[in-house]
Image (tube, rainbow, N blue to C red):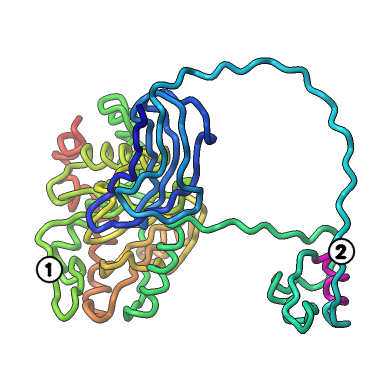
């Protein structure tokens, strides 16, 4: 029996995917539920598994764009497992390299090819003559230097190409500005130091910084609803809920899983959901539904050592908060110079929707909550243990 394996739909509104990588070879015997290939959509990379055991016949080559629902391979379920016989390796006789075809080239072309050790240039001049332009278009200019100066070309994945397009469109289609502030992280550090062991023991995961930032963002979005909105054509959409996208670095690139209805979540729920989604993003098992939507984004360049940045808005959202590393810095408090753990924060926003007053006020509200977390995020001194689920 021949079983057709078709491209599943990665999600609503996605009609095409790219077969990025086959995990098996044509003719291999595969087991049921074995992962056989990876497909890229403009949202995520997904894997396709064999629906039954048998011998596989690949019908679509890697790096091919194919429509959802088309057959990419077939499995002969009547085939038996292939037993490979051990064979002694035989030394292959040496084969002389075939002579390179003769070609003519202009003096300028010859000079560049000689200096860069460039081969495989196709001539477009009269009689196949290689021109200087042929050489330059074959390989980017590298200049002359010492040692090996090779290059490697790798096709961008569909996800990376789509990301590049989206990021460029943000710069071209929005009036993006960025405002900055600094946050004294002393209070949050003290809370984490005091409760981290009990929190971890009770819930099975750490009390991180992200839950404090997520709750402070949710509070600020309630205070400044224009930041929690987006443009759709000639209309402005305002959301009465808070879905926060959390940027996560993965082997496939930057992914942004979404925390739904953050305004209804407590610290325990936020930390647990962030850990679950981040783990799925890094091991490639996250679904498209877990990444679509989002009304605001938080990105943390501080985990890589970033001191300051201007994050790019995640369209069609209108704003994004950038976190950075925490560094002990001298600051003036009540006329005295003291050393405090300081984080610079950045808010990039679409000025078509959000005015300067709102953007600055929004960032100040985040600073206020982070520097006074017991009062604004944890329900007062008597409510800390309860808020942290302890």
- Image quarter hosting the N terminus: top left
Q: Image quadrant of residue 12?
A: bottom left
- What mark, if any, has residue 238 been given in the picture? 1
- Image quarter hosting the C terminus: top left
Q: In the shown orientation, is residue 313 left or right of residue 375?
A: right
Q: Give SS at disc 1.
A: strand
Mark 2–mark 1 Cα distance, whole angstroms, equals 59 Å
Q: Position of residue 246 (x, y in %)?
A: 32, 52
Image point (17%, 58%), residue name: 219
Q: Which residues are magenta?
A: 110-118
- What mark, if any, has residue 146 been given in the picture? 2
Whether residue 184 is visible here, answered yes or no, is: no
Q: Image quadrant of residue 178?
A: bottom left
Residue in front for this viewpoint, 208 or 11? 11
Q: Position of residue 281 (x, y in %)?
A: 37, 43
Disc with the residue nearer the chain's start (2 vs 1): 2
Compared with residue 11, is residue 117 higher up or lower down, i.e. above or below?
A: below
Image point (12%, 68%), residue name: 238
Whether residue 330 is visible here, answered yes or no, is: yes
The crowding category of the residue bearing disc 2, from other C-alpha atoms within 10 Å (few below 14, some 14 to 19, many at least 20), is: few
Q: Position of residue 327 (x, y in %)?
A: 48, 55
């Amino acid at each position: 029996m021949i079983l057709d394996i078709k491209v599943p739909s990665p999600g609503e509104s996605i009609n095409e995917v790219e077969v990025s990588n086959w995990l098996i070879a044509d003719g291999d015997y595969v087991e049921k539920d074995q992962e056989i290939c990876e497909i890229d959509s403009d949202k995520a990379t997904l894997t396709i598994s064999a629906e039954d055991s048998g011998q596989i016949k690949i019908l679509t080559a890697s790096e091919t764009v194919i429509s959802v629902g088309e057959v990419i391979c077939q499995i002969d379920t009547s085939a038996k497992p292939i037993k490979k016989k051990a064979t002694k390796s035989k030394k292959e006789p040496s084969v002389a390299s075939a002579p390179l075809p003769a070609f003519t080239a202009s003096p300028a072309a010859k000079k560049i090819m000689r200096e860069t050790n460039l081969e495989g240039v196709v001539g477009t001049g009269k009689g196949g003559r290689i021109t200087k332009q042929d050489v330059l278009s074959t390989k980017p200019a590298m200049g002359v230097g010492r040692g090996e100066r090779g290059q490697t070309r790798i096709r961008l994945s569909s996800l990376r190409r789509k990301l590049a397009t989206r990021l460029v469109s943000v710069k071209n289609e929005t009036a993006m500005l960025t405002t900055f502030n600094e946050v004294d992280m002393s209070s949050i550090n003290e809370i984490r130091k005091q409760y981290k062991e009990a929190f971890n023991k009770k819930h099975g995961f750490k009390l991180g910084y992200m839950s404090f930032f997520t709750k402070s963002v949710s509070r600020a979005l309630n205070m400044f609803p224009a930041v929690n909105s987006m443009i759709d054509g000639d209309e402005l959409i305002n959301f009465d809920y808070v879905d926060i996208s959390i940027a996560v670095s993965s082997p496939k690139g930057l992914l942004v899983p979404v925390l739904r209805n953050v305004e209804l979540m407590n610290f325990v729920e936020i930390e647990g959901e962030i850990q679950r989604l981040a783990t799925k993003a890094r091991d490639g098992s996250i679904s498209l539904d877990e990444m679509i939507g989002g009304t605001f984004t938080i990105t943390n360049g501080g985990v890589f050592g970033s001191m300051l940045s201007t994050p790019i808005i995640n369209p069609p959202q209108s704003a994004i908060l950038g976190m950075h590393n925490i560094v002990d810095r001298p600051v003036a408090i009540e006329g005295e110079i003291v050393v405090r753990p300081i984080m610079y924060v950045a808010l990039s926003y679409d000025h078509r929707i959000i005015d300067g007053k709102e953007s600055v006020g929004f960032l100040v509200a985040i600073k206020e909550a982070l520097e006074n977390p017991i009062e604004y995020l944890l329900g007062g001194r008597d409510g800390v243990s309860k808020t942290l689920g302890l």
